[in-house]
Amino acid sequence: MQNEFFNHKLNVTRRHFLGKAAVGLGTLGLGSLLMPNLFKGDENTDELPLGLPHFAPKAKRVIYLFQNGAPSQLETFDYKPMLTKMMGQDLPASIRNGQRLTGMTSNQTKFPLMGSFFDFKQYGQSGAWVSDLFPNMAKIVDDLCIIKTMNTDAINHDPALTFLQTGAQVGNRPSMGAWMSYGLGSENKNLPAFCVLLSRGRGNGQGVYSKLWTNGFLDSTHQGVVFSSGEDPILYLNDPEGTDKDSRRRMLDKLAELNHLGFEENGDPEVQSKVQQYEMAYRMQTAVPELTDLSKEPDHIIKMYGPECLVPGTYAANALLARKLSESGVRFVQLYHQGWDQHGNLPNEMPLQAQDVDRASAALITDLKQRGLLDETLVIWGGEFGRTNYCQGTFTKDNYGRDHHPRAYSIWMAGGGVKPGIVYGETDEFGYNIVRDPVHIHDFHATVMYLMGLNHEQLTYKHLGRRYRLTDVAGKVVTGLMA
Amino acid sequence: MKSVVLKTKTLFYLLLASVSLASIVWNCIPSSAETGAIPDEVDYNFHIRPILSDRCFKCHGPDVNKQEAGLRLDTPEGAFAALKDNPKAHAIVAGNLEESEVYQRIIAKDTAILMPPPSSNLKLTKYEIELIGKWIKQGAKYKPHWAFIPPQKPKLPEADKDWVKNEIDHFIYAKMEEKGLEPNEEADKERLLKRVSLDLIGLPPSVEMQERFLNDNSPNAYERVVDELLKNKHFGEKMAISWLDVARYADSHGYQDDGLRTMWPWRDWVIHAFNSNYSYSKFLTWQLAGDLLPNPNKEMLLATGFNRNHKITQEGGVIDEEYRIEYVTDRTNTFGKAFLALTFECAHCHDHKYDPISQKDYYRTFAFFNQVPEKGLFGTIDASFADPPNMKITTEDVKSILKFINKKDTSNVTVMVMKDSSKVRPTYVLNRGNYDSHGERVGVGIPKAIMPFDTNKLDKNRLGLAKWMLDARNPLTARVYVNRLWASFFGRGIVKTLGDFGMQGELPTHPELLDWLAVDFRENGWNIKRLVKQIVMSATYRQSSAITENHLKTDPENIFLARSSRLRFPAENIRDHVLASSGLLNDEVGGPSVKPYQPKGLWEVATSGRGTLARYVQDHESDLYRRGMYVFIKRTVPPPSMLIFDASNRDQCEVQRSRTNTPLQALVMMNDPQTMEAARVLAENLMIENTPLETKLENAFRRIICRKPKDKELAILTQYFDSERTFFAKNAKKADKMLGIGEYKRKDVKDKNATAALMQTIQMIFNMEEAIVRG
């Protein structure tokens, strides 16, 4: 009788864990350990084996180096000598072809074409063009898959960022990382599946906002957890002054006794779940500081990422931390580096921004590679849209700026399942329109999900009557950039 | 019946251990909706529509542009008509499975003709196929959607006279009996008091109140408490919290630069409205259309701020019209969700896939909200804390008509309000929802299936809309509100999907009760306090929450309410509880939002650097101890401890919060300096009392857990206190450091080590599962 009851409780607790998704599911991603009620809200889960990929994944983890503010493709990877040749001439109407403009240039009567202030050279076996601003990335160009034909629907930062992160320009939808956490869980029981790292450069900045790493309508266990460079790497992680690990342990033991007495009276399985959560929190308190301590990294690693990586909160430090988190099994590490919004003063600001990210981004690829992790880690570098090929405002020989441009821009991907050493897609001579192989944001999402072993049409969540997807109702997997 | 308990501690820990194993084989308890015997009489509304809607309507439903093969299955006309491709055949032939193409397709082995097609990733279970088959055999009778039929007051079912306390209990009892369940006994007085106090004012009962209630043996002791709480000034605050989620209230504009806005006087009005027991009809009318009432006063105008709480962009360079349309869209979607529990937003770009809301209908409703003389971009960061149309609130106003506003100084405060332009702005269907892609021009209207909007009788503006909402024939208004209120007391709505009463929403578990409550609510003047009292006075509400073996077998989710649900407090009330039980709470009502302790750098690292909210400037003294609902909400960086406990980020209208249990919550409760400070202040106050230790521990326990500790519990507390005192005796510096947490002035205590030990003990009580759960 008692045994039967015992089993019964166990079942109910598991039901809390899994809801309907449990049907026929044998194993379960470790993510559910950190998040015991991962699948709560049982009316919402379709009967998919959550916690497992849909098919063999090419990559297990993602590191997304987000360049926030939108770096110009024309000063990074999309080399357009024509713009230098036609410097100052008006953008032909046939090329603009009805493109809507932001309020910042819509009143301009002229759209003077503007070539890059910085030279380009070809590198590697692939012969890809890279601007002089990125000497380190240039060196590893044969590991990169440069996509020159990203395109988006939005022309302003907030909607464009939101679109890129959540698949919709407005609305409170889950972020990419939250979808991965929901679909695949975590590989590490002491760490969240989705971690966020923030840094800021010296260029004109656009803020970031928590909606970018929101769980949306998914359970809040899928929310991105921000790691900060302050004293607490995770909010409220450190024991308060005057306590230490031993005294915390004493409290948790007594607390469990008290909760046990409560459970005897109310019989609520949630009580057990709560005790579990406290134990996990306790483990995180040890695991996380060990992980975020970069001071013990060997010299050659410090050299590789650059001395800045020892300054907490810099892009370099975050890149190194991203490697450590990823190596420890964090499913999705999202960096944001602010400062890429060069409406003016581009020739002065872009070198500073490039200085922040060039060495560490390249180091991350090299570091993952030497650890044998690049094959199973997908690294993405890029912003939310491109920039215009014409100057915003008046230009002088050594100063100009570029407005937002949604029709074509460049990013790169590397590692997990991506074809290395290729340049995918082509833009016209003006760097304005795509002439071959466009990659829309929805396609990009479908592709990243595919690489992670997820079918973007199958990973759905039913919310208020509708099955939502990261790719909304569109998206094609871009097979051309797969290894 | 007392709950069956596990006898040994070993079992408890064994249970914990096994729970954490990743792969265990188990027998899953199937949900009743999926299996069980096929009912004798298959009902379209309760059995068939949920299946057809979920698996078929996306391609064969109300969206006229997506009716594959020209077939729609959401109407009998569509289902019984000759097929477009094969006029001799019919999708459904009543009573005939062989000739019903639908049935043949859902049982097909050939995947080329199988429905739903494998590419849709949708499937029908065997049980569902059997249900559909039986329904067709029984004549395939369609019925209108339950939520669109105006509610009628049903007769009260028979119930145990000794148990029932009011009408609610008749319905609950009848359903319980049907399911073979028996109600729990009434909760003990201490737990009942904690429950009703938390539910009505969001604060714990003081020890004095606990004593008074325990000693009051009169038959109406409980009712007296209820009446007292309903009159309490904090009642309005508690009721307001979920309405602020619905109204997406925040203290910043949202979007990237995210400047300050000053809508808090509107928030003060919401509290005032609940405290003054404004009828729901007045509450709704003033918010939807206060400005359109004859000779509106400033209070009526203030109420219309509801429709201006949406986010507003301050990003230089945006296209004005794109964002103006965005705001009107937000208002339209919010209207649909908040008042009608329908997913209007699904018809923004195309006809609704499941519900009878065409895209044209959507823009007709949109037209009501499209008349505001406003701009998409009024100005960049800090150009305005309240974009026009707006209203200035002066000290004079606060002395006269707006007495409830907690304005702290003599400066004026400006709030955004609603206004219609004198000239009607034309409204067009926007193709694919694009702001610059005008389709057909439309006038105001509402989807007919809900209830026609008679433009001959009703004003063609928001006031007409409010009147339409309150018409006795409106099938949704009362049901939706009653259901949402019900959920706040039972943790689950009679319709579980609080925001979706459409085809894809859940069916009501107690449809007669829902209708009875809805009609009763409307017939009694939409009286909110009366409805609240009805609920908390019921025997259903007053049951004990102890979970028995039979509960877990028959009703693990507590759908049938044979017990009270144990519910964790909402995020704001967790903070309130810590502050109130420690004696730190500043219980002032209303006023500008406050900035209590927050981990360093959160705003700074995410900001663009522009505007007055680029840096977090923490408040001090009594402003540190305000209730959770007054914590400043900067939309791009909402208060972290609130989000961790599932609060809304106020990005858009939200009617239902999730209730999770995570390690991050454990970290907040253990390490947030606010909790530590509260523990410290309470410890100091108890230490300077001339009482034995046991009394101090018992007092702390009663303040936080709201009941007397059992001997075993007191023993654990004492043991822990002793171990900590020994620890601090060896680590006196640590004791001093701990007692330095928080800005609240330290008390001069004699024995610092004992005080620190008591502080730790109190901190442990705060972390007990029961502390922030109302059982």
Image (cartoon, grey):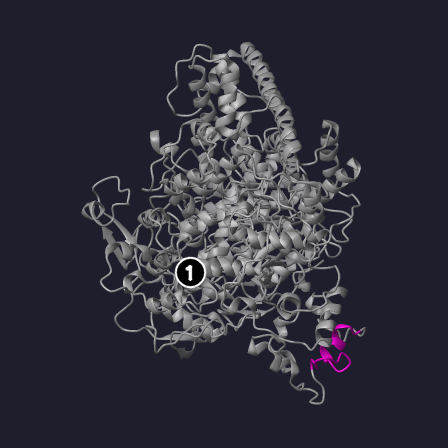
Image vertical order of residue A468 relative to residue B104, above or below: above
Going by the image, does B550 lie left or right of B408? right
Q: Nearer the viewer, residue B764 or B416?
A: B764
Note whether residue B504 is visible. Answer: yes
Residue A225, percent from left and from top: 56, 42
Q: Quadrant of the C terminus of chain B?
A: top right
Going by the image, does B598 lie left or right of A222? left
Which chain is disc 1 placed on? B
Residue A208, percent from left and from top: 46, 48
Question: Badge 1 local density, few (<14 within 10 Å), some, or many (20+)?
Answer: many
Image vertical order of residue A264 relative to residue B156, above or below: above
Residue under numbered circle 1: B522
The magenta region covers: B91-108
Q: Nearer the viewer, residue A137 or B415?
A: B415
- Which residue is depicted at the point 43% across and 38% down? B225
Q: Is residue B103 magenta?
A: yes
Residue B6, percent from left and from top: 72, 32
